[in-house]
């Protein structure tokens, strides 16, 4: 394909995501480390792009390394209890200064509008406020954590009203109490509670630690996480209850995974853990079907189900290239709409990955399997086998025990799945009359 065709087909392929994301609330949490990175400005460009596509964005930033630097400059030592820093009044001063500085730097970057840059013509309105009510962590293991706190309440209505006005909401890891005190919170805690309170479509954490090299595989390398997890699977992983062959959750990722799982359990549709080191990571995760990080959802995203009329477009996208190559017999949209009840589809997160149709010939006690297709990017994962098994069960449930298929390119695949080569004369009479001798498809039959 030429670069132009590539571009056009790529641009078209993102259209469903653009439609799906418009008007939806995404909460994006990123660490203080990310802000110091040279690539941070690219991330801001991506945020600008998402905002211009109508995504309602809430950004929650961290400031851990900046706080540490400020504490070091002031030669202040702080105690840590169970991974949490004790924030005494002197440390709180450093926290306020660092968080304030980081917050303003992000707001400044989001305000850019230089010509000849992705921010040209952008006019993002950034808004902040006292959206987070906090309370103290209290005394843990006999140590008073003082100004180290946790989220108590989120003013969701106030955030929603800013988002409705088209603002990007920027939230820091500081919270305020009704007694007028300030509390030092974690970015993960704030982002999670904000996402839950807003009933967000997505909570996205950009992390420091996922293994970038794992991006290409279905299941990441030993230190990283599977591409997709349900809440139940994530909990098993966190409890280290999965088989020994499965990866353990690295300590650095554990808190984010815990928060991400909680968010999903509490109603956020999807949470994503993405490596911050990949340029354009957020776009890759959101606008490609593969994604590059780990996505957590309440239920499994894959379903083998009866096709519905709304699936016609997805099925056509899948089979048209195969029809053009002569691998499948051409079916127009109209015929597909009429015969949609005969189809079973394999859907993954709203995308049709595979399909198959079953045509019964009851008088001759046989069924035809037709139009079995798996998207080329998802072959060799056993999906074809799953669809075939499903079709075989459908055949048996109709009291029929003979399944046949006509194929030009997948003869060996069917033979390996128990079919034997037959002749057109063995087909049901009606089918024999329709047999296309020019196409010379192979006839394969399986007795179930
Ligand atoms: C045939 C098809 C449905 C298989 O789907 P799939 O999801 O890749 O199948 P599975 O994962 O269950 O099986 C993969 C195995 O089949 C093999 N295989 C895939 N296509 C094959 C073919 N055309 N001929 C022989 N073997 C094939 C793979 O090499 C793999 O073998 P392995 O397990 O030894 O590595 C898919 O290749 C396809 O859509 N083909 C184009 C449409 C078509 O020809 N349909 C049949 C006419 S109705």
Image (cartoon, rainbow, N blue to C red):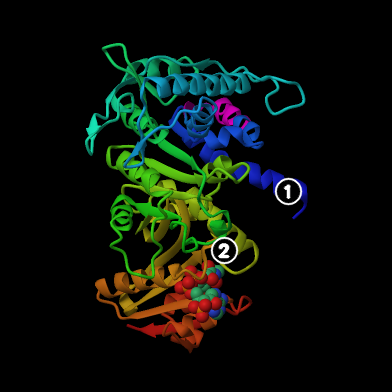
How many discs mark residues in the rendered view? 2
> Which residues are drawn in magenta?
45-60
Nearest the eye: 163 or 74: 74
In this picture, residue 252 sits left or right of residue 285: left
User: Mark 2 near ligand 1 (CB under 8 Å)?
Assistant: yes
Q: Position of residue 35 (x, y in %)?
A: 58, 32
Nearest the eye: 173 or 141: 141
Tell me the residue at 60%/27% (across/down).
48
In this picture, residue 232 sits left or right of residue 285: left
Report if residue 396 lies within the magenta region. Answer: no
Q: Position of residue 215 (x, y in %)?
A: 55, 56
| Mark 2 closeness class: few <14, some 14–19, many ≥20 residues within 10 Å | few
Callout 1 secondary element: helix
Report if residue 59 lies within the magenta region. Answer: yes
Decide if residue 442 is in sight here: no
Which numbered tag is attached to residue 5?
A: 1
Q: Position of residue 216 (x, y in %)?
A: 57, 59
In this picture, residue 276 sits left or right of residue 169: right
Instruction: Check contact, mark 2 vs mark 1: CB within 8 A.
Output: no
| Mark 1 closeness class: few <14, some 14–19, many ≥20 residues within 10 Å | few
Image: 307 above or below 160 = below
Measure the alpha-carbon separation of dots 2 and 1: 19 Å
């Amino acid at each position: 394909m030429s670069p132009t065709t590539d571009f056009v087909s790529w641009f078209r392929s993102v259209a469903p995501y653009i439609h799906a994301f418009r008007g939806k609330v995404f909460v994006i949490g990123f660490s203080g480390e990310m802000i110091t990175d040279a690539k941070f400005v690219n991330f801001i460009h991506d945020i600008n792009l998402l905002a211009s596509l109508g995504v309602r964005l809430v950004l929650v930033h961290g400031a851990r390394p900046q706080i540490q630097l400020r504490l070091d400059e002031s030669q202040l030592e702080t105690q840590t209890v169970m991974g949490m820093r004790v924030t005494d009044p002197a440390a709180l001063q450093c926290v306020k200064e660092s968080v304030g500085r980081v917050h303003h730097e992000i707001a400044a970057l989001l305000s850019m509008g230089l010509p000849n840059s992705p921010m040209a013509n952008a006019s993002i309105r950034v808004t902040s406020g006292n959206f987070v009510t906090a309370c103290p962590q209290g005394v843990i293991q006999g140590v008073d954590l003082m100004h180290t706190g946790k989220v108590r309440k989120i003013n969701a209505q106030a955030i929603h009203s800013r988002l409705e006005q088209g603002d990007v909401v920027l939230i820091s890891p500081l919270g305020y109490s009704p007694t007028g005190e300030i509390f030092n919170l974690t970015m993960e805690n704030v982002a999670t509670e904000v996402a839950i309170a807003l009933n967000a479509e997505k909570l996205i954490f950009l992390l420091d630690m996922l293994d970038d090299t794992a991006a290409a595989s279905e299941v990441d390398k030993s230190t990283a996480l599977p591409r997709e997890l349900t809440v139940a699977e994530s909990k098993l992983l966190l409890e280290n209850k999965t088989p020994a062959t499965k990866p353990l959750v690295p300590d650095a990722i554990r808190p984010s995974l815990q928060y991400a799982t909680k968010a999903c359990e509490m109603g956020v549709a999807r949470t994503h853990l993405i490596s911050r080191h990949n340029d354009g990571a957020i776009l890759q995760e959101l606008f490609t079907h593969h994604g590059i990080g780990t996505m957590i959802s309440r239920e499994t995203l894959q379903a083998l189900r009866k096709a519905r009329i709304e699936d016609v477009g997805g099925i056509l996208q899948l089979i048209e290239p195969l029809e053009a190559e002569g691998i499948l017999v051409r079916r127009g949209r109209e015929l597909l709409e009429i015969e949609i009840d005969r189809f079973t589809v394999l859907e993954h997160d709203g995308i049709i990955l595979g399909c198959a149709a079953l045509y019964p010939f009851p008088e001759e006690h046989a069924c035809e399997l037709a139009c079995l297709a798996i998207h080329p990017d998802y072959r060799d994962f056993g999906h074809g086998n799953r669809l075939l098994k499903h079709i075989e069960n459908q055949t048996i449930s109709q009291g029929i025990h003979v399944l046949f298929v006509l194929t030009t390119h997948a003869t060996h695949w069917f033979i390996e799945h128990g079919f034997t080569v037959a002749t057109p004369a063995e087909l049901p009479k009606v089918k024999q009359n329709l047999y296309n001798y020019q196409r010379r498809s192979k006839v394969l039959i399986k007795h179930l």
